[in-house]
């Protein structure tokens, strides 16, 4: 992964860092702004726009991620960005309004020259591909970050018809091979400056047995990749929103649980208090009853004494 990051164009690195920011991912030193504060003592996070930072800073930040899920996200995002660039290049090479038959005719009338060292002038490419053709540079060269790696670019050789392109490919002096998609190509070794030898590939744009239906399928695949890229972007943004919503709900649920616990606790305390009050009331009633009974016991002898005194007094009077 580190080697891939070192060789990426700045545009791709910027997009990767922005995707990581959107996902709120944190590496070993934290997020993007944490990284800037740590590695740039002068400006820190005051200049946080990735587009205004160097390739070294962007790639160094992306290298701080070591969790498997984060690395997987970065890898998938990188592949998506590279696929998008490839689709754009294909769209530029083949007009969208052409029919499958026209597309097949256009493809077969072209040869792709790729992995051309930037030190090779495009004018020298006519020496590699024989015949009457027009050379157009399609992808400009870029400088890999790793020392020792050469800058490359690619170009297209356009012929008047597929027959001329086929004949030119047959006349190319090189080692026959096939690329990862199974398209015929040749590895060409030639000397463009006295004493300097280099290599590049010359490849057909279509298989000899391709049909218009297969070309139509390719166009649908290309369009599908574009739509898929947009769909994945929307899906990623939607996923972030859902995660935020889930966290919010989780916090809300936790808060509700706390409130319920508080209510239960208060209710429990209240019940205990009521029990104490009821118990006190019962004790008071019992004491009142005891006092009342005691008063009755005391009052009975008093009444008897009073009656006896009253009788004795009456006797004396008589």
Image: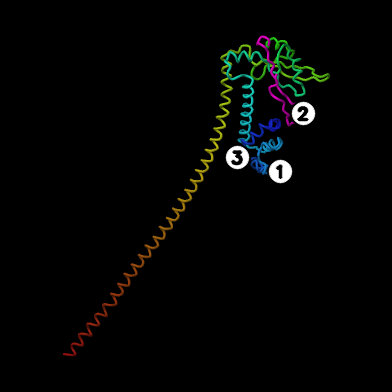
Which quarter of the figure is the N terminus placed in? top right
Residue at 70 percent of width and 19 percent of height: 136
187 sits to left or right of 318: right
Judge by depth and name the residue closer to the eye, 40 or 263: 40
User: Do residues under tags 3 and 2 come within 8 Å of each other at their CB atoms?
Assistant: no
| Mark 2 surroundings within 10 Å by alpha-carbon count, few (fewer than 14), some (14 through 19), many (20 or more) | few
The residues tagged by marks 3 and 2 sit, at their Cα atoms, a distance apart of: 35 Å
**Disc 3 designates what residue?**
24
Q: Is residue 213 left or right of residue 184?
A: left
Give the residue displayed 62% in from the left and 13% down from the top.
105
Q: Which mark is first along the chain, 3 or 1? A: 3
Q: Residue furthest left?
A: 318
Q: Quadrant of residue 57?
A: top right
Q: Earlier in the sequence, mark 1 or mark 2?
A: 1
Q: Which residues are magenta?
A: 136-164
Asked if 267 appears above or below 218 in the picture, the reply is below
- Color encoding of the figure: rainbow
On residue 40, the disc is 1
Whole-number angstrom distance, CA of label 1 to CA of label 2: 28 Å
Name the residue beneath numbered marker 2: 148
Question: Residue 161 in magenta?
Answer: yes
Q: Percent from the top left, x then y, of residue 248?
A: 51, 43
Find residue 204 and report its horizontal and vertical position in percent: 67, 15
């Amino acid at each position: 992964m580190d080697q891939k990051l070192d060789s990426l164009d700045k545009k791709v690195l910027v997009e990767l860092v922005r995707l990581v920011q959107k996902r709120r991912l944190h590496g070993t030193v934290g997020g993007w702004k944490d990284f800037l504060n740590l590695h740039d003592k002068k400006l820190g996070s005051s200049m946080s726009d990735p587009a205004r930072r160097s390739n070294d800073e962007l790639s160094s930040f992306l290298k701080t991620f070591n969790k498997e899920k984060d690395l997987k996200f970065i890898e998938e995002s990188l592949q998506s960005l590279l696929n998008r660039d490839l689709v754009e290049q294909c769209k530029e090479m083949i007009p969208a309004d052409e029919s499958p038959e026209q597309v097949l005719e256009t493809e077969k009338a072209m040869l792709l020259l790729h992995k051309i060292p930037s030190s090779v002038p495009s004018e020298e490419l006519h020496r590699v591909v024989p015949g009457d053709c027009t050379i157009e540079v399609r992808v400009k060269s870029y400088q890999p970050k790793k020392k020792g790696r050469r800058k490359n670019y690619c170009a297209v050789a356009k012929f008047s018809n597929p027959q001329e392109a086929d004949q030119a490919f047959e006349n190319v002096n090189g080692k026959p091979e096939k690329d990862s998609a199974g398209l015929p190509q040749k590895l060409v070794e030639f000397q463009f400056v006295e004493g300097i030898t280099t290599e590049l590939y010359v490849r057909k744009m279509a298989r000899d047995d391709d049909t218009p239906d297969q070309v139509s399928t390719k166009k649908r695949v290309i369009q599908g990749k574009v739509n898929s890229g947009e769909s994945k972007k929307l899906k990623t943004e939607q996923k972030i929103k859902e995660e935020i919503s889930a966290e919010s709900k989780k916090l809300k649920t936790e808060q509700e649980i706390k409130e319920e616990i508080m209510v239960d606790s208060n209710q429990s305390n209240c019940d205990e208090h009521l029990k104490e009050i009821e118990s006190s009331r019962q004790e008071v009633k019992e004491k009142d009853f005891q006092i009342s009974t005691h008063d009755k016991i005391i009052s009975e002898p008093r009444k008897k004494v009073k009656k006896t005194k009253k009788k004795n007094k009456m006797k004396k009077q008589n």
